[in-house]
Amino acid sequence: MPNVLTYREALTKGIREALIDNDDCFLMGEDVGAYGGAYAVSKGLLEEFGPKRIVDSPLSESAIVGLGTGSSMVGLKPIIEIMTINFLLVALDQLVNHAAKIRYMSANQYAAPFMVRTVTGGGAQLGATHSQCFEPWLASVPGLKVVAPSSPYDALGLFRSAIKEKDPIVFVEHILLYGSKGIVDEDYYEIPIGKANVVRSGDNLTLVAYSKMVPLCIEVANTLEEQGIDVEVIDLRSLRPWDKETIINSVNKTNRLVIVEEAWRSGGFGAEIASTVQEEAFDSLDGPIGRVGGLEVPMPYTSVLESQVIPSKDRIIEYIHQNLNT
């Protein structure tokens, strides 16, 4: 039976299930305990599971991720919360040079099976150092997996799969999605990591996005339909691994591709998708691959300027009309 949950509630449900199912699982991060989490995802869990399972950490991201790495190597199952993906910058050595490499460098004798939950994205007027999207950076690292759900249904299904991973996984939650609502099955389900979702079928153009850009692209597709353009929308769900087969199959059908992401175009994940499609589906393309990303500036604080930096419905539609001759 379906049930309507917020994105936040779906994540809380996933964490609670993991804590109930595995006595070695614990949640650790800044303000996850008594405060209930910076985004209220862990609200109530301290009272339910106690301070040995819901652990308020020091204000040191390198220590938090280091503890996650070490404790997972000896058999525990930590869920590490980093308040914002921007703060992962001071823990990249632990995550990239240690957690992601330990299975390879130990010849499979050790692994670090833990989850890093963190928050990405702009739109909340948090300024230039708290509004960045670094998930494309992390997706370039062998040994890590990176997922970025766009709906409550996907958040719970991907979380259930992620908690079972045998290596470190970065679970990226968008700051503006926590209050969004969606239908979530009451029956247990999982969503495999690395499998994209065709959220809207179409024949004239393929739009690929992830995280907060997915509901935006659905709005774009609905508007373009009124203009006689039938758009297929694909939600990547996972950035590493990513599902190139679903995208290529769509391009083979629609013959056009536009990739939308909130991150900067320079070094963005859209470039990886574009180059792969160019290499493997060039003959299916009727025009250049389009990319819409965040503007190449630090994120402004004021909402008027911030809204100009982040891709918008109007900017995506204008780009499609001007650059793809549709």
Image: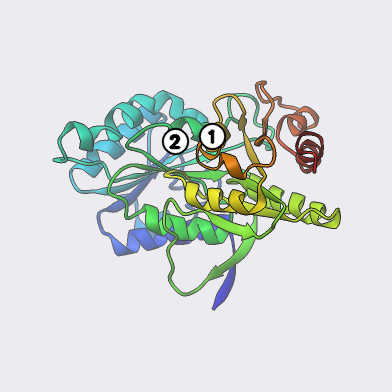
Image coordinates for residue 115, horizontal then vertical, percent:
37, 45
Vertical arrangement, residue 211 with respect to residue 91, above or below:
below
Placement of the N terminus among the 4 image quadrants:
bottom right
Cβ–Cβ below 8 Å for labels 1 and 2?
yes
Q: Secondary structure at mark 2?
A: loop
For image coordinates 34% across by 29% down, the residue present is 96
The residue depicted at 34 percent of the width and 24 percent of the height is: 93
- Which residue is the extreme one toward the bottom? 1
Asked whether residue 47 appears in the rendered view, the answer is no
Determine the image quadrant of residue 16: bottom left
Q: Is residue 42 above or below residue 168?
A: below
Q: Is residue 117 toward the left or the right of residue 49 in the image?
A: right
Residue reaching furthest to the right: 227
Sort mark 1 into few (<14), some (14-19) or many (20+) by Cα contacts within 10 Å: many
| Residue nearest the observer in this picture, 23 or 103 | 103
Residue at point 77%, 43% (across, down): 313
Q: Along the horizontal axis of the image, is 38 left or right of 88?
A: right
Residue 79, x across and y down, in percent: 36, 47
Mark number, residue 269: 1
Task: Using the rendered image of the protein, determine whether residue 93 is visible from the camera's viewpoint.
Answer: yes
Q: CA distance from mark 1 to mark 2?
A: 8 Å
Which three-letter amino acid code belongs to the residue tagged 1?
A: Phe
Which of disc 2 and disc 1 is earlier in sequence?
A: 2
Tag 2 residue: 139
- The numbered disc on residue 153 is none
Residue found at the far top of this picture: 297
